Image: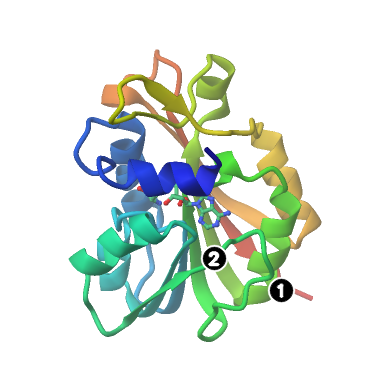
Amino acid sequence: MNVQDAYNTWADSYDNVQNKTRDLEARAIRSMVLGGPFAEIIELGCGTGKNTEWLATQATHLTAIDFSAEMLRRAKEKLPHPHISFQQADIMQPWQFAHSPASLITCSLILEHIHNLDFVFAQAHRSLQPEGLFYIGELHPFKQYEGSKARFDTAAGGIFELECYVHHISDFTEAARRHGFSCVRLQEWFDDDNCTTTPRIVAFLFQREDNA
Ligand SMILES: C[S@@+](CC[C@H](N)C(=O)[O-])C[C@H]1O[C@@H](n2cnc3c(N)ncnc32)[C@H](O)[C@@H]1O
């Protein structure tokens, strides 16, 4: 099963099973993305809408993207708001979904499935307005080193593990630097806020550099 098919299958249970990574990242984005309202937000990999509902309260217009028809269908059913445009698209193809230059792009728990970070940063730079913000919240690479990755229980029984790539912290910061972003915030998030354990989530806020 490729990643797209896997999310079409996982969509049935994604909201209903315990998922510490999903829930902790929801806290991270709400804490790190400040300064709204934003005229145009692009949400990459919106899934079933975990963050879409909150982002919609921060945006004049929100473009929510996912390549899984089944994840997207659930998000649309939950959030029939006229200022949200849901679009089925693969973020590894040139981005043609932007409504207007975005003031904020968000990306939650999707880059684990993307091999080429450079393509994503290049497209984000093109799609943002000057000094626009790019938020990324991902499974922390320290968790990945311990073997954590996106997986779900299948209806047939058994666990299905999705295709995932490890991205080190410097992979994000160096890709950002190469494509004209500075890192304005970097935070690590721990289960039960217990900083003696391995961090579960890493979250970055990058800004498009447009100073002379
Ligand atoms: C772990 S889910 C996260 C969903 C949501 N952002 C959240 O935090 O709950 C990853 C999502 O990214 C989507 N996705 C993965 N690769 C993608 C790609 N290349 N283009 C568009 N969406 C993609 C999947 O379909 C899935 O909905």
Q: Position of residue 105 (x, y in %)?
A: 51, 65
- Check the image and tell me how it is coloured: rainbow
Numbered disc 2: secondary structure: strand
Between 57 and 161, the residue placed more toward the observer is 161
Q: Quadrant of residue 74?
A: bottom left
- The answer to whether one can see residue 60 in this image is yes
Asked whether disc 2 touches disc 1, contact meaning CB atoms under 8 Å apart, the reply is no
Q: Position of residue 94 (x, y in %)?
A: 69, 70
Q: Position of residue 132 (x, y in %)?
A: 57, 71
Judging by the rendered image, the residue that carries numbered circle 1 is 210
Total numbered circles: 2
Q: How many angstroms separate mark 2 from mark 1 (CA)?
A: 12 Å
Between 69 and 17, the residue placed more toward the observer is 69
Q: Amino acid at mark 2?
A: Leu
Between 34 and 138, the residue placed more toward the observer is 138
Judging by the rendered image, the residue that carries numbered circle 2 is 133
The reply, left or right, for residue 160 in relation to residue 118 is left
**Rendered view: 210 above or below 13:** below
Q: Amino acid at mark 1?
A: Asp
Q: Image quadrant for the C terminus?
A: bottom right
Which residue is at a point 49% across and 59% down the rendered structure image? Answer: 67
Which residue is at a point 32% across and 53% down the rendered structure image? Answer: 30
The reply, left or right, for residue 193 in relation to residue 101 is left
Which residue is at a point 48% across and 21% down the rendered structure image? Answer: 148
